[in-house]
Amino acid sequence: DSRPKDRENAMRAIMHLTNEDENHRSMCHKTILDALVVGATLNGDEYGDMQESAIVAMERLATDFSNRPIMARHPGLLTAVAKATERETRQVDKGVDPKSEHLAKPLLMSLLLAM
């Protein structure tokens, strides 16, 4: 079944599009945010890369201050970021080397402040 790989590729594509500052405002859209929430909340070790890509994309979108209130009010987004914070904390507690920086906690704080 190629669907999990296709989903991962789609999430990575969204993440890569958020690299460009000029994309941040246009990508802070319900459809993209819905996809990021789904990607960040899928359960299972096989979805770890997708979860990470979703959080990285959210973090990049949140660098545009005008996006933060939109993101903070998007259904399920704060919960998804809070769950990612818990995952990152469990990794630290287990002594697992992170694949990337721990972004969820600072993202969660910035979104809460934007409410």
Image: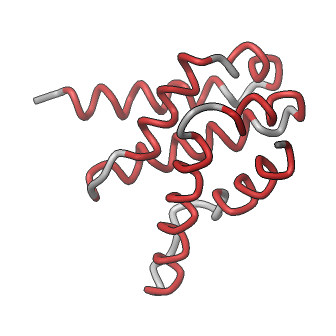
Say left or right for 106 vs 43. Answer: right
| Residue farthest right in this picture | 65
Identify the residue shown where x is 47% and y is 77%. Answer: 90
The location of residue 1, given as percent across then percent down, is 10, 30
Image quarter of residue 75: top right
Identify the residue shown where x is 86% and y is 51%. Answer: 113
Quadrant (top left/top right/bottom left/bottom right) for the C terminus? top right
Tally of numbered tags: 0
Up-down relation of residue 76 to residue 18 (above or below): below
Say left or right for 110 vs 82. Answer: right
The location of residue 96, given as percent across then percent down, is 45, 79
| Residue farthest top in this picture | 26
The location of residue 93, given as percent across then percent down, is 50, 86
Say left or right for 100 vs 1. Answer: right
Image quarter of residue 44: bottom left
Up-down relation of residue 89 to residue 54 (above or below): below
The location of residue 95, given as percent across then percent down, is 48, 86
| Residue farthest left in this picture | 1
Foreground pick, 5 / 83? 83
Identify the residue shown where x is 45% and y is 47%. Answer: 51
Identify the residue shown where x is 51% and y is 62%. Answer: 99
Q: Which colour style is shown?
A: secondary structure
Image quarter of residue 18: top right
